[in-house]
Image (tube, rainbow, N blue to C red):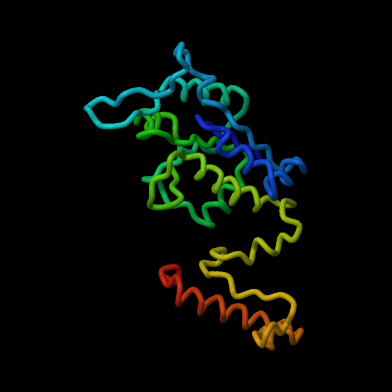
C-alpha cells in the first residue's frame, strides 16, 4: 500500500511516521508513506499557498493551483483509489472505515489548513472527506497521521500477531474486554480466576461478556 500525504507542515508528522509500527511496515516494504510539501507546487514567487477568502470572511484559504498541481503530479505516477481531504465536517472516521481503506492500494490524503481549502477542490478533486472528531485542529496533519496509523497497522504482516488486531476495540462494534498480565496477585489486586484456568471456552465466554458489559456501560451507542 502507498499513502501520499499533501501538507504545508511535513515536519509536524515526519517523526510520527518513522517510528514504531509505521516504521516497521515501511522497512518491511508493506507500506510506502510519502510526504509532499505543498509549497513545492506553487508558482507564486513567495511560495504562498493561501489567500484571502471572497465575501469578507476572517482567516485565510488554501488556493486551488498548488493543490491541483500536486494531485495531478501524483496521478501522473499511478492511479489512486481515493483522494481524501481531512476536514471537521467530513464523515466520521471509524474502525470499519480503517478496515475498508486498508484494502486499497494507493491513497492521497490532503491535510487541510488555515480556514480550509477553496471549495472547488472539494467539488472537483476530492473523492472522500473524513473527520477524526467533532473539534478543530491547527491542521489536518494530525488527522492524517491518525488515519495512516489506523490503516497501516491492519495490513497483513505489519503486526506480528495479526489476531491481536482482530480483537481490538470496535472491530465487532464492541469495546475490548479487560486485559491483565503478571503478577496474578499484586497487593491483593487479583486477576480474574477464569483467565488463569486455561479453559479456552470459558475464557472466550468471559471475554465476550466483559466486552458487551463494558460497551453497554461506556458506549451504549455502539450496540444500536
Q: The C terminus appears in which quarter of the rendering?
A: bottom left
The answer to whether residue 202 shows anywhere in this view is: no
The spot of residue 165 in percent (x, y) is 65, 61
The spot of residue 88 in percent (x, y) is 39, 45
The answer to whether 14 is drawn above or below residue 53 in the figure is below
In the image, 35 versus 45, the foreground residue is 45
Q: Give the side of residue 180 with respect to residue 219, left or right.
A: right
Q: Residue at x 66, y 79 (%)?
A: 204
The answer to whether 190 is drawn above or below residue 141 in the figure is below
Q: Residue at x 35, y 34 (%)?
A: 115
Q: Residue at x 52, y 23 (%)?
A: 70
Callout count: 0
Q: Residue at x 68, y 64 (%)?
A: 164
Q: The N terminus appears in which quarter of the rendering?
A: top right
In the image, 53 versus 221, the foreground residue is 53
The spot of residue 53 in percent (x, y) is 29, 26
The spot of residue 76 in percent (x, y) is 58, 22
* Residue at the extreme left: 55
* Residue at the extreme front: 187
The answer to whether residue 143 shows anywhere in this view is: yes
Q: Give the side of residue 61 with respect to residue 74, left or right.
A: left
Quarter of the image for residue 192 reads bottom right
Amino acid at each position: 500500500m502507498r499513502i501520499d500525504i499533501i501538507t504545508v507542515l511535513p515536519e509536524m508528522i515526519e517523526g510520527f511516521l518513522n517510528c514504531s509500527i509505521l516504521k516497521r511496515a515501511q522497512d518491511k516494504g508493506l507500506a510506502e508513506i510519502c510526504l509532499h510539501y505543498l509549497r513545492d507546487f506553487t508558482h507564486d514567487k513567495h511560495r504562498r499557498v493561501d489567500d484571502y477568502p471572497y465575501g469578507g470572511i476572517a482567516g485565510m484559504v488554501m488556493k486551488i493551483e498548488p493543490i491541483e498541481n500536486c494531485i495531478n503530479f501524483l496521478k501522473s505516477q499511478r492511479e489512486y483509489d481515493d483522494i481524501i481531504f481531512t476536514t471537521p465536517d467530513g464523515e466520521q472516521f471509524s474502525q470499519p472505515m480503517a478496515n475498508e481503506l486498508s484494502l486499497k492500494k494507493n491513497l492521497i490524503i490532503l491535510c487541510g489548513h488555515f480556514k480550509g481549502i477553496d471549495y472547488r477542490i472539494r467539488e472537483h478533486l476530492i473523492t472522500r472527506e473524513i473527520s477524526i472528531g467533532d473539534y478543530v485542529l491547527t491542521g489536518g496533519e494530525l488527522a492524517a497521521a491518525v488515519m495512516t496509523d489506523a490503516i497501516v497497522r491492519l495490513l497483513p504482516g505489519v503486526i506480528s500477531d495479526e489476531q491481536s488486531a482482530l480483537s481490538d476495540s470496535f472491530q465487532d462494534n464492541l469495546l475490548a474486554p479487560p486485559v491483565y498480565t503478571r503478577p496474578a496477585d499484586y497487593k491483593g489486586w487479583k486477576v480474574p480466576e477464569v483467565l488463569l484456568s486455561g479453559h479456552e471456552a470459558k475464557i472466550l465466554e468471559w471475554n465476550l461478556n466483559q466486552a458487551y458489559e463494558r460497551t453497554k456501560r461506556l458506549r451504549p451507542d455502539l450496540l444500536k
